[in-house]
Amino acid sequence: MREPCAIVRDTLAYVGSKIRPGVTTKELDEYAEKYIRSRGAIPSELGYCGYPASICASVNEVVVHGIPGDRVIRDGDIVSIDLCAYKNGFHGDGARTFMVGNVSEDKKKLVRVTEECFFKAIENLRAGTPLYDIGARVQKHAEENGFSVVRALVGHGIGREMHEDPSVPNFGKAGTGIRLKAGMVICIEPMINMGGYQVDFLDDGWTVKTRDGKPAAHYENTVVIREDGVEILTI
Ligand code: MF3
Ligand code: CO
């Protein structure tokens, strides 16, 4: 899985380098698809349950699964890019939220805290840790900072399929859930809202927006559980 995950990491950085005011999310999708294919991988979001693009590009109040299209990126936007690559019979999955130009202080804090939620989640994570410790740590850090955790979408196992067991919520009670085992590969992906946790699913079948229209951020890595910690594959 190292190879598809490295391709995810590199594609995220490459797409990030293309984000500037005036670019459309469709153009970002084209950059990503070309790049992933140039590395001999398949953009595995394309066609997944009928999904029509190679990346999810979610701007401001869009939490996740924004379908690339004619939306023009503007100064002050935050743009979450989520993508998967398939190679060697396995998937990699990762997401970053990019800040465009002059971003407000509260959006900067949202993006920073969302990334911190991931790193809080993997602190002392190892074989034997109860699964819902992950969500408990994410939720604690998000809520301590005045933000809220999306409940309607969760992280997941990953391997030969993009989404495998177990579900990995970003909320929950510490000390509960199955015990993680060495060798498990999971995607930890905090989705954090500046306002309330409620989201709406749009009629296009994909786009998830915050109900209150306030911004959201997303950060995701594929990680392997080891006896003594975790190995992050998409950084
Ligand atoms: N990559 C997403 C995840 O983090 C899944 C997106 S499904 C898609 O799990 F079809 F919208 F691409
Ligand atoms: Co994922």
Image: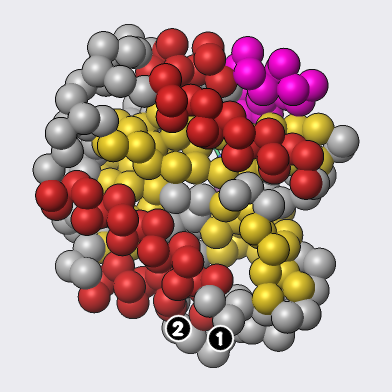
Q: Mark 1 — residue?
A: 176
Q: Is residue 218 above or below residue 227?
A: above
Q: Are marks 2 and 1 in contact (CB under 8 Å)?
A: yes
Q: Give the number of the disc on residue 173.
A: 2
| Residue type of the residue flagged with mark 1 | Thr
- For label 1, being within 8 Å of ligand 2 is answered no
Residue toward you, 87 or 209: 87
| Residue type of the residue flagged with mark 2 | Lys
Label 2 sits on a secondary structure element that is: loop
Q: Residues within 10 Å of mark 1 (few under 14, many from 20)?
A: few
Magenta region: 33-49
Residue toward you, 231 or 162: 231
Image location of residue 41, percent across then percent down: 76, 25
Image location of residue 196, percent across then percent down: 19, 58
Is residue 94 in view from this perspective?
yes
Could you tell me how far apart the alpha carbons at marks 2 and 1 are, in whole angstroms?
Answer: 6 Å
Is residue 200 in view from this perspective?
no
